[in-house]
Image (tube, helix red, strand yellow):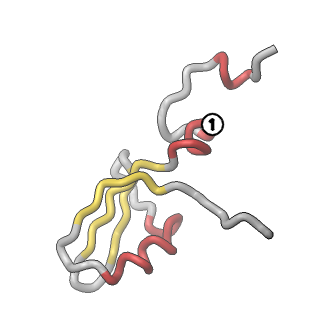
């Protein structure tokens, strides 16, 4: 028997898809801050704060279109 979610067409940004694909994210750097947007246009910086902090080293006016994927280091 197949899992129930395999019977449903999965669009991007749905929970089963997120496990594999992550979130499509646009990152914009300004002189003072970094802002991340979802594909829908909503602000998602608060959900990806670790990316925003790390990307503060990028030059202002940098715009990245990427996929943000949750990841945890394996425990030894």
Q: Residue at x 62, y 36 (%)?
A: 16
Residue 36, above or below 18: below
**Residue occupying the point 55% across, 27% down:** 10
- Between 19 and 30, the residue placed more toward the observer is 19
Residue 53: x and y in percent read: 44, 80
**Percent coordinates x, y for residue 54 in the rendering:** 43, 78
Q: State which quadrant residue 51 falls in.
A: bottom left
Q: Is residue 41 left or right of residue 16?
A: left
> Residue 11, position in %: x, y?
49, 30
User: Dividing the image into 4 quarters, which one contains the N terminus?
Assistant: top right
Q: Which residue is mark 1?
A: 16
Label 1 sits on a secondary structure element that is helix
Residue 74: % across, % down:
72, 64
Query: In which quadrant of the rendered view does residue 58 lie?
Result: bottom left
- 21 vs 32, left or right, is right
Q: Is residue 29 above or below residue 38?
A: below
- Compared across the picture, whether 52 is left or right of 74 comes to left
Q: Residues within 10 Å of mark 1 (few under 14, many from 20)?
A: some
Q: Residue at x 37, y 76 (%)?
A: 55
Query: What is the residue that sits farthest to the left in this orientation?
Result: 61
* Quarter containing the C terminus: bottom right
**Vertical placement of 37 versus 15: above or below?**
below
Name above or below for residue 7 compared with residue 40.
Answer: above
Give the mark count: 1
User: Which residue does the image show at 66% across and 64% down from the upper left?
Assistant: 72
């Amino acid at each position: 028997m197949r899992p129930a979610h395999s019977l449903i067409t999965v669009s991007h940004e749905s929970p089963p898809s997120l496990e594999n694909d992550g979130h499509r994210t646009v990152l914009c750097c300004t002189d003072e801050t970094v802002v991340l947007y979802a594909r829908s246009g909503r602000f998602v910086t608060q959900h990806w704060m670790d990316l925003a902090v790390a990307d503060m080293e990028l030059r202002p006016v940098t715009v990245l279109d990427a996929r943000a994927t949750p990841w945890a280091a394996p425990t030894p």
